[in-house]
Amino acid sequence: MITDINSYRHKQKLAHINELVKQLMAVRVDIRRLKIKECQLRNTIRELAQELEWSE
């Protein structure tokens, strides 16, 4: 009986770990996407700032 309970708890913990890993991977994908977006915005801002300086 105790072995069954320990086995069940072990399986539950593994399932929880797997779910947390999935969430972590999703967050990493979001971070990567946001970093790309940040770079694009910085480049656009830099280009617009240069255009303003050239037009003066």
Image: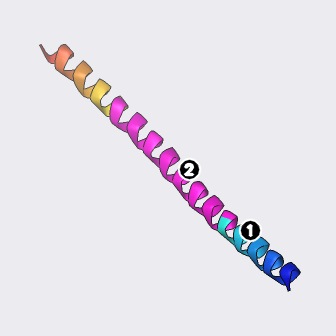
Identify the residue under disc 2.
28
Identify the residue under disc 1.
14
Residue 29 lies, in percent from the top left, at 54, 53
Which circle, 1 or 2, is nearer the viewer? 1
The part of the chain drawn in magenta is 17-42
- Position of the C terminus, as image quadrant, is top left
| Helix, strand or loop at mark 2 | helix
Above or below: residue 37 compared with residue 44: below
Q: Nearer the viewer, residue 40 or 38?
A: 38
Task: Give me the residue at 61% from left, 61% from top.
Answer: 20
Whether residue 19 is in magenta: the answer is yes
Task: Give me the residue at 15% from left, 17% from top.
Answer: 55
Above or below: residue 43 compared with residue 13: above
| Helix, strand or loop at mark 1 | helix
Whether residue 24 is in magenta: the answer is yes
Task: Give me the residue at 65% from left, 59% from top.
Answer: 21
